[in-house]
Amino acid sequence: MAVPSAHEFHWQSLAQLPTGRVYHTLSEVGGQMYMLGGCDAAGRPCPIACPCLQGDRWINLTPMPTPRAGAAVAVLGKQILVVGGVGEDQNPLKVVEMYNTEEGRWRKRNTLREALMGVSITVKDGRALAVGGMGADLLPRSILQQYDLRKDVWAQLPPMPTPRYDANTHLLGNKLYVAGGRQCKRPVKAFEVYDTETRSWTTLPMMPCKRTYGGVMWDTAGKLCLLGGLRQGGGHQSSKFTKNVNIFDTNQGAWLKSEETVAMKTKRADFAAAFLRGRMIVAGGLGHEPSALDTVEAFHPQKKKWERLAPMTFPRCSVSSIVIRDRLLVVGGVNQVQPGLMDAALLKAH
């Protein structure tokens, strides 16, 4: 399949957000984007409406009953399940709520057994699988739990070998992959997979390096791609920005050798990353500059090189992003001027 050339990608500014936002979660139902929770410029979870982007305007919907930031979100049919996160008192939450996009209303659902933030969530066969998290005692959890919408029940499944929060999860067939994450702010290299049929965990080859705030994405061929971030040194060494790329091939069950991967052009962390039209895209973030980055680059799989794309309108980091209908939407975030950006932008290729 031919991929778009670099000059075919361009940015389009969307309507401004009602308020600046960071640490929000984006979700898509029926081609429309919903924004859930997040913090304002002062770092407080937003007790405001859940906006929906329709065309080029934001529609304020019914406010989420519990203000929160960093929530885990899963789409179950026409409903959006919102799990855990951080509340107004800066502590983890066990509250679970669901928004019905057709009825336009919220319902309280059965809570988690304990308050958790940094939960990772995915959906299989109409049920949500929630992995890990950090409790009120600031310790990581190894818990795996499954939510049944019809019964409104959370069931405990076999726990994963490595407790962690903020892990990256991905479902391939009957296997749930869990990569990286953190333990008490320290990054972990653990990489494990849960087989939903045998209900058992398998430990995979560890991630090549400890890194935080990197890009994590899965391609359509079942490859896990880790990009950039802050590499963590041993002992008292400080963190360093990297442009390193690591790729795990699930078919081979191994990490590709360094000579089989191509490093990004720019060292960066805390950026937007996505697959778009067959190309890996990275946008914005922080690097060896005094302010946030506006630069964007994309990997060309046939040429095997990274190419510059048009820069974003505003430099930013800590954004939330989502791909809907072959378009990358980048929403909110932080730059030096505005702690909570009110801007939203869309990247597409013609």
Image (spheres, rainbow, N blue to C red):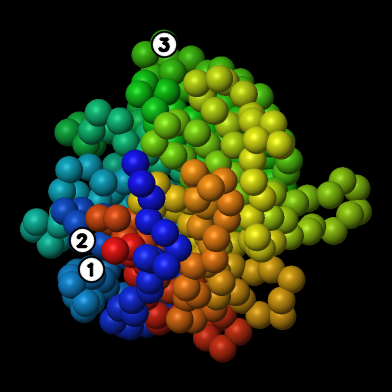
The residue sitting at 44% across, 39% down in the picture is 219
Residue marked by disc 3: 198
Whether residue 240 is visible here, answered yes or no, is yes
Where residue 32 is drawn, which disc sits there? 2
Outermost residue on the left side: it is: 103
> Going from the N terminus, do you reach mark 3 or mark 1 first?
1
Q: Secondary structure at mark 2?
A: strand
Query: How far apart in space, not on screen, are marks 1 and 2 (Cα)?
Result: 7 Å
Outermost residue on the bottom side: it is: 337
Type of the residue with mark 3: Thr
Where residue 52 is drawn, which disc sits there? 1
- Specify whether 168 is left or right of 264: left
304 and 72: which is toward the camera: 304
Where residue 99 is drawn, which disc sits there? none
Question: Which label sits in the foreground, 1 or 2?
Answer: 2
Question: Could you classify mark 1 by the number of other residues whose Cα lies within 10 Å: few (under 14), some (14-19), or many (20 or more)?
Answer: many
The part of the image, by quadrant, that contains residue 8 is bottom left
Q: What percent of the width, then of the height, locates residue 198?
A: 41, 11
Mark 3–mark 1 CB contact (< 8 Å): no
